[in-house]
Amino acid sequence: QVQLVESGGGMVQAGDSLRLSCACSGRIFSNYAMGWFRQAPGKEREFLGVISRDSAITYYPDSVKGRFTISRENDKNTAYLQMNNLKPEDTAVYYCAAAYYWPDRSDYPENYDYWGQGTEVTVSS
């Protein structure tokens, strides 16, 4: 089993930056690709990006490309989501997820094996 715990969420103002962390325990962190998703009230879970085991590959949807950056530190068993120039529409619960195999469709939540409990981000205008 892999346990994932997100942290770093909170209330910020539009234009601010925030870095979320995802701490992994239970298995070898470097064996997993790590993805980030978010879910706003009444909406489907939205893919934000994914990073490969060795950080060599990252992929982002156009909706957040250039504003959000995913990184990881395998020696600390932690993945990060750096979010810049936050907007009120970024308000959501943010989740990290782990995939043992690089997902063919990284934007499909069902292609990830483990999930954290989420951390809430609220952006005020």
Image (cartoon, rainbow, N blue to C red):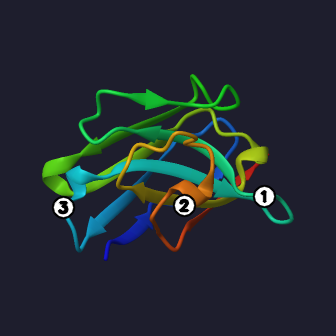
Residue at image mark 3: 28
Please name whichever residue, 108 or 47, is drawn nearer the observer in this view of the structure. Answer: 108
Asked whether residue 11 appears in the rendered view, the answer is: no
Q: Which residue does the image show at 72% across and 54% down from the upper left?
A: 91
What secondary structure is marked by label 3? loop
The residue that disc 1 covers is 44
Query: Where, quadrant-wise, is the C terminus in this rendering?
Result: top right
Label 2 crowding class (10 Å Cα cut-off): few <14, some 14-19, many 20+? many
1 lies left or right of 104: left
Within the image, what quadrant is residue 24 found in?
Answer: bottom left
The residues tagged by marks 3 and 2 sit, at their Cα atoms, a distance apart of: 19 Å
> Dividing the picture into quarters, in which one does residue 28 lie?
bottom left
Closest to the observer, 8 or 24:
24
Left/right of residue 75 with respect to residue 59 in the rendered view:
left
- Picture coordinates of residue 71, whole percent (x, y): 35, 38
On-image quarter of the N terminus? bottom left
Counting from the top left corner in percent of width and height, residue 93 is at 64, 63
Residue kind at label 2, given as amino acid type: Tyr
Q: Which residue is pictured at 47% across the width and 59% down the height?
A: 97
Query: Circle 2 sits on which residue?
Result: 95
Q: Secondary structure at mark 1?
A: loop
Instruction: Name the front one of labels 2 and 1.
Output: 1
